[in-house]
Image (spheres, grey):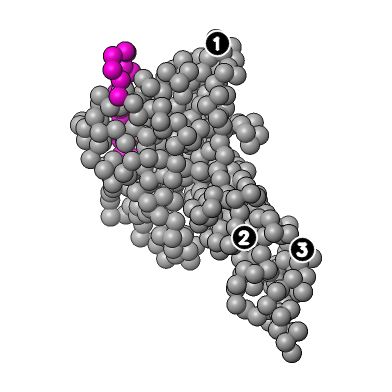
Amino acid sequence: MNEKSVVRYTLDSCEKCLKCIKACPTSALSMVDNRIIIDGDNCINCGRCIRACHSKGLLAQGSPLSKVEDYDYTVCLIPSALSSQCASMEEAEDMFANIKDLGFDEVIDISDIEGAIMNETFRLADNISKDSVITSFCPVIVQLIETRYPMLIDHFAPLRYASELAAMMARERLADKDNVGIFYLCECEAKLVLAKHPYDNPNREVDHAISIIDILPFIQKKRNGGERKEVNFSRAGLQSCNTALIPQKPEYLMADGFEKVENILELAEFDLLKSFRLLYLFACFSGCVGGHLMFGNGYLAKNNVHALAPREMNTPPELPFELLYCEDVIVEKKSQVSVAEKMAFFKQVNEVLEKLPGLDCSACGMQNCRIMAESIIKGERKLDDCIIGRKKEKAE
């Protein structure tokens, strides 16, 4: 399923330093007329441009909490990554009660769903006869494979996102209620797009995705009196969001961190990881507990799991195949260009590239000289747009 870009450019804050352009792994950013342009087709919502910008010229936008008022009955889905930040059951129950007080009728822990999906991943990997299975519940990884490693699409296990599955089950249970709104608290920028609004995704089951960091001041309070929200966590679910806790086998390869994942996908594309049955990938360090919209210490979250679920509590449910799998989780971006046309384009790009300085300075507003050459061939830029080249010509 193609996702839209959650990155928004705030012109007033931009210092034109071009760090965001250099940071983008898919060359989705460029500068035109002193303004950053985001190519939605190539943006994978990894947030690297946002973190590269020290002046907050780029921001990730989800839904505001005020959207709760648009519905007659509201449900909030809590991911294991957020629950794992709590050092005790008392702290977790306080947090769940505080979230409910924000205006939700129900607050649902989805660790059981996350645990069920992780267990299905292992079952699938252990039963394949050949090749390896790639799985990830990180939209960044999904879009990265779609955009840069399409040869690996057939290896990807199309399991639903836990938020989607939890929302589907909640809607079925609440079918007798009118105007139900389902909200999901997000650990990272990429998951903000896993909702109907504000990015016009009608096929999503979740209505709104809210950044965890945006509601942080309201959910960390220690309750002095008042009702607590009792929670029974699935240990498997809490483990699923933390690479240090996911069950390991010699034939499983777990990886966290964008650079490491890129390296693994490159090796997998050349069939150099055949000894592994499963590639389990996360874009963030430590997994979802290290999401960039989280708070707290992702490393300490490993210890918190033992306090929240010292033994297997709330065993993950056995979910039917038709719920677990979804064909449009990942899509192949089929090219209408023939091999001959691709080779002709490649030759033209190389010819233009020889006329450029090859400094990859980004002064033209593009990430590097090759991207600039491609834009020139496509008619989007001119050779004169190369500032260094223009100065060199004048000097000669």
Neighbour class for label 2 at 10 Å: few (<14), some, many (≥20)? some
What is the magenta range? 222-240
The quadrant holding residue 336 is: bottom right
- Mark 2 residue type: Lys
SS class of the residue under badge 3?
A: loop
Name the residue located 61 percent from the left edge and 31 percent from the top edge: 197
Q: Is residue 246 left or right of residue 104?
A: left
Ranked by sequence position, the earlier of labels 1 and 3 is: 1
What residue did someone put label 2 on? 16
The quadrant holding residue 328 is: top right
Neighbour class for label 3 at 10 Å: few (<14), some, many (≥20)? few
Query: Which residue is the extreme one toward the top?
Result: 176
For the residues labelled 1 and 3, the Cα–Cα distance comes to: 51 Å
Image height check: is 25 above or below 286? below
What residue did someone put label 3 on? 380
The x, y position of residue 34, in whole percent, is 69, 59
Ranked by sequence position, the earlier of labels 3 and 2 is: 2
Name the residue located 61 percent from the left edge and 65 percent from the top edge: 367
Image height check: is 366 above or below 355? above
* 274 falls in the magenta region: no
What residue did someone put label 1 on? 177
In front: label 1 or label 2: 2
SS class of the residue under badge 1?
A: loop
The x, y position of residue 43, in whole percent, is 60, 52
The x, y position of residue 321, in whole percent, is 46, 32
Say which quadrant the C terminus sits in: bottom right
- Mark 3 residue type: Glu
